[in-house]
Structure formats: structure tokens, C-alpha cells
Amino acid sequence: MAFREKYSDFFQNLNEEHFNEERFVPAVGPEDAEVMMVGEAPGENEVEQGEPFVGRAGKKLNEILKDIDTDRSEIYITNLVKIRPPENRDPKKKGIRAWKPLLEKEIEEVDPDMVLTLGNFASKELLEKKKGITSMHGRIFSREGRKIMPIYHPAATLYDQSKTPELEKDLRKAFGKEETGQTSLKDLQQ
């Protein structure tokens, strides 16, 4: 079932000022995923391709997922706000409030073991905290019995490469692939 059809009740009640078909990007991934990633909002490349995290930040994310032997196709990937904000600006509070009920419904439906919030907007909104991503990343929080881990947005690593090892470390932790400092049998076989 298509995303818009599945959540048709939400879309019927969404105020027109918060929806633009041409800038809309639905979620992708299995609806029974163990891990859900929540970004901020789609960018230009995402709108063009109709999928979250396909631009430069998405390529960086894919690279790190590959490095930690994790298949992106097993992750449910969505955004806090499902339309690209005008001029690629940050989402406004009013827009976030309009789209948050849909995200809550997605989380309920997918029922992942872990929700990874990418960057400040998704992290602050889902955890209802004022702290920034720098102080929260890599920590596992519980909200209504669900594990939520804020991580750096992959775009942050494009501007500050020193965040790349932190993002990789957090993703390893989220997917249970933390480095132990020991050589594994898998490493020896390669």
C-alpha cells in the first residue's frame, strides 16, 4: 500500500499550508523494521528522487552503513517533516507540529526496537528535550517504553569531518556492531 493511502486520514486533515505535492517525500523501508531513522526534512535531491537521504548526506550515511556491514534496505527511513521547506530553511515549529502526528503514527505502526533521531530537530522533538545533539548523541533514551538514540545528522559530517567517527560509533552501537578491539572470526576470513 502506498504511503499516502496508508495514512490517508492524516492527509485529509492536513492543512494546505503544510503540504505541497511537489515537495513531498514519503518514508521508505520495511514496515516491520527493527530500526527506524528519523531525519529533519527532505532536501532538493530527496524531492527529485522521492526518497529520504539520497543526497550528499544520504551518500555519507550509506557509506557508513556499508562500513559497519548494515543493509540500508532493512531500515525504515522517514523525516520529521515530509515536505522540503522553502529555500531549504529549517522547519518551523508550526510545520513540525503539523507533521508530528504522522511521525508518531509511523512509529506506532512500524513498532521498531530502536528509533534513531538524526540531528537536532528530530532529537529535540521526539525526546521533548532542549539539549542539543552534541550532548545527547550516542545515549539511549526511553520514551513510552521505546528506545530512542539521537545521532549526528550525516550532513554534519560533511561540514565537520571530526563528527564522522562519532556517527559511525553511534551507528555501531545502535546496530549492535560495536568494535571490541579484538579480531573477529569474520575479520580473519576476509
Image: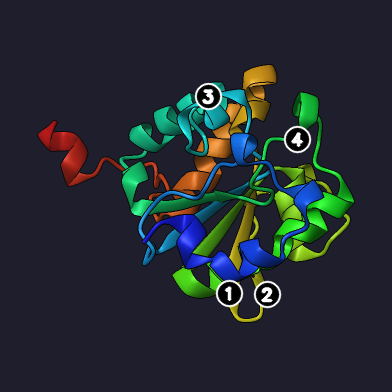
Instruction: Give the side of residue 31 with respect to residue 27, left or right.
Output: left
Which amino acid lies under the numbered mark 4 shown in the image of this protein? Pro
Amino acid carrying mark 1 in the image: Arg
Which residue sits furthest bottom? Answer: 145
Frontmost residue, 46 versus 16 = 16
Count of marks overlaid on the render? 4
The residue labelled by disc 4 is 85
Q: Earlier in the sequence, mark 2 or mark 3?
A: 3
Point 36% across, 62% down: residue:
1
Indicate whether 35 appears above or below 45: below
Q: Disc 4 or 2, which lies upstream in sequence?
A: 4
Nearer the camera: disc 1 or disc 3: 3
Q: Secondary structure at mark 3?
A: loop
Whether residues under marks 1 and 3 lie with C-beta atoms below 8 angstroms apart, the answer is no
Residue that appears at 61% across and 24% down: 44
| Residue 150, percent from left and from top | 65, 52
Amino acid under label 3?
Answer: Gly
Name which residue lies at 76% across and 45% down: 120
Checking the image for residue 143, the label placed there is 2
| Residue for badge 1 | 146
Q: Quadrant of the C terminus?
A: top left
Task: Specify the amino acid type for callout 2.
Answer: Arg
